[in-house]
Amino acid sequence: MDRRRRRRADILLVLVLLLALGLRFYRIDAQSLWNDEGTSVALAQRDLLTIARSAAHDIHPPLYYYLLHGWIALWGQSELAVRSLSALLGTVLVLFTIQLGKLMLPSMAAEGGEAAHTGCAQAERIGLLAGLFAALSPFLVYYAQETRMYTLCACLGAASTWALLQLLPRWSRAEKDSGRHRPLWRGAQGWAACYVILTIPLLYTHYFAVAVVLAQNLAFLYWLVIDRPGNSAGLLRRVLIWAALQGLVLAAFAPWLIAARGQLQAWPAVSEPVKLTALMVDLLRVFSLGLSAPARPALLLFGFAVLLLLGAVAPLWQGWRNRQTSLASTVPHMMLLLYLSVPIFLLYLLSLRRPMYNPKFLLICAVPFALLLARGTDTLFSLSASDRRARVGSLLVAAGAGWVAVASLVSLKGYYWNQAFARDNYRGIAQYVQAMGVPGDAVLINAPGQIETFSYYYHGSLPVIPLPLQRPLNKDITLADLQNLVKDRRRVFAVFWATDESDPERFIEGWLDNNTYKAMDSWYGNVRLVVYAVPSGAIEGRIEHPLDVEFGHQIRLLGYNLPAETVTPGDILQLSLFWQALTPMTQRYKVFTHVLDPYGHMVGQRDAEPGGGVKMTTLWKEGEQVTDNYGLLILPGAPPGEYLLEIGLYEADSGLRLFVVSNKQEAGNSVVLQAIQVLPAVASPPLSILGFTGETDAHFQSLWLRGYSLARLGAEHDPTAPLHPGDIVHLTLFWEATRQVTEDVVVTLRFLDSSGKARLERTAPPTEGMYPTTQWLPEQLVRDQHNVVLPDDLSVGTYRITLEVRTLATGQQLGSPTTLGSLTLQ
């Protein structure tokens, strides 16, 4: 390769590596550590002997924890610090992918890198394409931003395979040259040592790395068959040398294998049984688009499948057509095919006995997948690379690479920004507990293994109590622990994860559902935060407010208990409902409980199936009485005043409400139980728990607009839900009084079209006048809700929303109008 071409190749290599590094560090600390990452960080901070002892009782060897131990000692334990090790290893993995790509051509493999001019250029092209695809791979990027051992395992697997492909052709040449009085193995011993040195730590990284070693052994057998030495003595010598190399690897790993054999035998199933076809389809999706694939990726996957098939078959076809090509030159490609397929089929076979499918175990296959894509893309050039069609070939390569790049970037965008693909959010849970917890509260961790991840983020003063303390759970001991947990407590913040393993009978959650008031049940990824209000005494079984109200002629509300009729924002209103089944039911119903202001705005809500989801209506027997407890969290910032407590039932699958029958007459689809009083907050809540979607810094003299939330009414949990003419927009403004407000004000909301003309306008005082601004206290945060009906004849398009504040008495404008954002009507 001439110097100019070499310099260009080096520049492209550096650019690919910089791209890989940038993608792996971009927003690396945007997501919370999830449980396994927190466990890694906690384990790595212990001494080396404790790490070894703990890893022997876990399902992973200790090498990664040792590396992380030293890394944390150097750089600390921030999210950036602990994840940066994987990010850097992921970049090194891309480098090894490029180097492996250069060895895929016969000339490069056979000559040890001294290929002819054309072959060298093609090898560079394949290597750079493979590196580009690995750099962009959403699957590799995801695990390069995770504090776990999977990227290290993939990196060492690629390095070990690279050393093997360097070794085999040199070994063959050394044997041929030995007749010329050259020492046998000269030029190959170093690569043999390199192979052993890289393979031993590979096995100490993850047990399933044995699949890579198995693929390498099968590749060696293939090489042994198609590149046979001239006599049986030479064949035996090869076998003995290879056995010695594998023996060194096994001897180095055997002590750990003996120490951990008990855990390996007891390794539990981690997945449902999977069919081979389903496994292959899912792996095509994961290897191509990662874990953040678009909703309907069939067309995208078709392009990947075509390139993959070309990369697998075309080199074999070209080698068969080129009769001058030695069979030995097919070893690198066969290694590549085995590198991809052996781990997949081994995992499938192992899963027949104990299902263990998890895509992360096959991250080692992402490298050969990228290499096959690169070979398939380069085949497009080879098929068109005559002098007259070279430009067509270049365009085809650009199209294939562009397809992979665009699809990968689409998936990466989802990974970086779409919360649906985010890891379990322990950071968010800890922030909520930190903001809402007060003396007298406690945190329950179920399963106990989460405590290290939760404690990584939570630095408050509340006691953090793991339960159950035994596995399997001892009900008598756990019952006593639960009773001690709630004794003299005000609230319990319970963090539930992997309860199928720690509490398969749901004993802990069931006891809390029956003996406290569940106020919130929110998912943070695959982790749930459940907030319980603890009653001051035993929950009263006697009905204090008797009623006789029927719902749909199927369920009777016998009455309710309300221990307290006053509550402050951020606190929990405790409500017990008493139901009776009038007839056997085949339909599951949910109960809704709302706290409404006089204008219908909710400041408290709890929708759930009875009994926290375990006393489903389909289980009720005719005549049975069911006690059903609810805790209603009053939204922080709710203005003080009188509110109504409303309840009802609706079908769980359709949302259709049951009609109410009172005094033998239909009376709507809900029942107002009574009025309650929300008192002024003792202190303003932290901004972090208000949940607004837009932050502002607009000042209107003594009023400060801190933020807002905008969504379709009824879809506040999903601000991206589409809006249509006729819908109702729910807009919440979050105000803070910077000092005493001397005049009441009104706010005007305007919806401006693309020309700046106001198409919709609404004027009202904050909180609809329920809590006049002159009564606001300095530094008090107030939640101000507005419902705006979009007319049926309002044109589709994008509208900018502006807000203006004027005094109520004189109409004087305060400050300048501010823009709150925009909405799009479809």
Image (cartoon, rainbow, N blue to C red):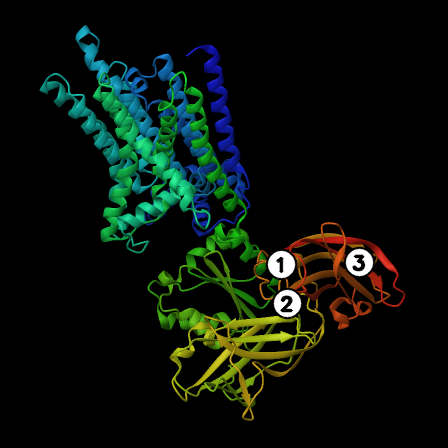
- For disc 3, the marked residue is 804
**Amino acid type at mark 1:** Gly
Question: Which quarter of the figure is the C terminus placed in?
Answer: bottom right
**How far is disc 2 from disc 3 in space, using C-alphas?**
25 Å
Residue 45 spot, x, y in % from top left:
46, 44
> Which residue ends up furthest to the bottom in the rendered image?
663
Question: Which quarter of the figure is the N terminus placed in?
Answer: top left
Q: Secondary structure at mark 3?
A: strand
Of circles 3 and 1, which is in front?
Answer: 3
**Residue 489 in sight here:** no
Q: Quadrant of residue 178?
A: top left
**Residue 195 in sight here:** yes
Q: Is residue 572 positioned above or below 541 on the image?
A: above
**Amino acid type at mark 3:** Glu
- For disc 2, the marked residue is 635
Identify the residue shown where x is 86% and y is 66%.
743
Q: Which of the pair 44/681 is nearer the observer? A: 681
- For disc 1, the marked residue is 691
Q: Secondary structure at mark 2?
A: loop
Q: Is residue 383 positioned above or below 762 on the image?
A: above
Q: Which of the pair 175/822 is nearer the observer? A: 822
Q: Earlier in the sequence, mark 3 or mark 1?
A: 1
**Amino acid type at mark 2:** Leu
Identify the residue shown where x is 35% and y is 24%.
383
In this picture, residue 459 sits left or right of residue 497: right
Identify the residue shown where x is 86% and y is 65%.
742
Q: Secondary structure at mark 1?
A: loop
